[in-house]
Amino acid sequence: MFMIKNRMVALMAFIGLVFIWVVDASVQEDAIRITNLSDGRSIKQPRHPKLDGQLSNLILEALYGHLQIPDPNLGKKISYYKGKDMPVVIEIRLLKPIGTAHLGTMIVRRAIEDVGGEIEAEAENLISARLSPKAILTLVNNDFVQTIRLPLRPEIDTYISEGVAAIGANLWNALEPYRRLPRTIKIGILDAGFKGYAGLLSSELPSNVNVRSFRPDGDISANEVHGTACAEIIYDMAPGAELFLVNATNEVTTRLAVDYLINQGVDIISYSMGWKNAGAGDGTGPNCEIVKRATDRGIVWINSAGNETGKHWENVFTDSDNDKYLNFSGVDEILDFWVPSYTPVSVALNWDDWGIWNGLSYGGSRQDYDLDLYYWTGSKWIWVESSVREQTGQQWPVENIGGWYANFPTYWGVSIYRYSTTRNCKLELFVDGNSNNIQYNVPEGSLLTPSDASSALAIGAVSWLSDSYHSYSSRGPSHDGRIKPDFCAPSGVSGASYGIENFYGTSASAPHVAGALGAVMLKLGCDAHQAINLIRARIIDLGAAGKDNFYGEGRINLKK
């Protein structure tokens, strides 16, 4: 295959001595990769060990324009920030005692203010802030800053739901309560947004709901109807439950949102979202820790498994021609996928070198791979962007590229480059560009986090009409070998938010399970864990006998 670039790295010395709480105001590029393109151009890309690759590229483009691609057919990159400031998450270097306020947090907070940044939210060792590109390059030299990265952002998968009758919740809700005692069941719906919810009160939703936004702008709507659609299903399934509609934007505000739901005493959290490159896929990581925080307090966490089956690849790094590029098959070094015009493309790479999870942070990776993005002109591959984060033992083993689109439908491609490694790691790649059949697709292990959490009930998707498996529904095993999903439930259902039979995805399946648990609790006066045992006793086993990575234990069922 025609390779379009050679690689070399030029290291630059640190400029000046930085005291613990004093940061140098000059712009520094402590390490760069110079990529020589086939057309003679050289692209400078920073390899600062504290910056993720995608953020480095955005900073460089904002300050110097190094990533401008001269092809008029390639659309402009979608901006991740407005005005002069970028949204970032700053991970603070841990000091003992872990979990308490410490000197590092106070110093970094002050440093953010000194460079003109705006702090949006704080949670333990994480700060969500908005900073200018120059301010980021200044703050990155603070000794208490572990890493600065773009915020992790969850993915959303997208009348009375047909799943109500398929599961039998309508029959269950018609029963007389077993115990005539006051019983309030509280269900939290944690999502991206709840557009239009107010217009559905007293019809598709109860007359009163509890609403709280943890977005920096406080917008519960967020121009996103996804959460409203999930709430509709839960209300259909368990009309007597008290609902809490809560939204968040990133891993910091999500942690604060869950703490709020815990304090409100919810019985169930329904979470129809998932994250890429946010953990090792073995039940560890910041978002799985959020799940554990809730389930340790007796809350049942219901999570959509994800819709990534056709957009996932994983395998051990192989390089049969010894040019440092991974061979996906034979000597093919580019995995391609078809993308419609004007559709944003994103790719996320991680590998099995996360280090030990200590409850707040991973140990970090010393195996360094890079990620490259291309698009097909009709006659050749054109390099677009690389993610070249440096892994020196403290960083996550991840690379991300996103935001590009073409003005015409075409193939896009990704390649993986071994920059500096001592072993061949197992790599995992997620691709998004409205493409459900990527080349060399590997459906197994396509779960999004935190559905891999051991204490989360991950939910897969089946047809409400026929119980047939929906081919997009993410499947296990988890990276530590556990069977996932745990259950499956209907999808492709109707509602006021998305219309008739138009709410597809495991996003629709998860609230069916949350609502089913609520319905059982309301009628029996039992807790959520007792309700789970009843559902297990009535489960409809699908596929191979027993629990499997397609259907879990089977489709939930409340009928006799």
Image (tube, rainbow, N blue to C red):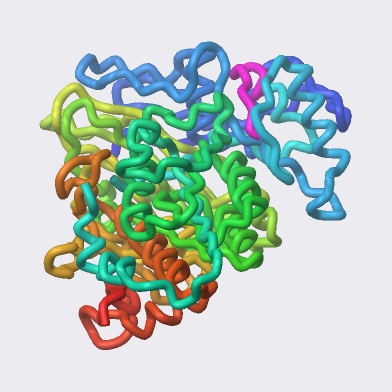
Residue 515 is left or right of residue 142, and the answer is left
Q: Nearer the viewer, residue 12 or 286?
A: 286
Quarter of the figure that contains the C terminus: bottom left
Image quadrant in which you'd find residue 306: bottom left
Residue that extends furthest to the bottom in the rendered view of this protein: 545
Q: Nearer the viewer, residue 475 or 526?
A: 526
Residue at 70% from the left image edge and 37% from the top image edge = 122
* Residue 440 point in image, percent of width and height: 23, 58
Image quadrant assignment for residue 148: top right
The N terminus: image quadrant: top left
Residue interval drawn in magenta: 128-137
Q: Residue placed farthest to the front in the image?
A: 180
For image coordinates 81% across by 25% down, the residue present is 110
Q: Residue 39: horizontal and vertical position, in percent?
A: 30, 22
Asked whether the viewer can see residue 387, the reply is yes
| In this picture, residue 214 sits left or right of residue 522 | right
**In the foreground, 438 or 486:** 486
Residue 12, relative to residue 455: is it above or below? Answer: above
Q: Position of residue 68 (x, y in %)?
A: 37, 17
Q: Is residue 429 above or below residue 433?
A: below
Residue 400 screen position, x and y as percent: 44, 40
Residue 133 within the magenta-colored segment of the rendering = yes
Look at 43% across and 30% down and name the residue there.
Answer: 221
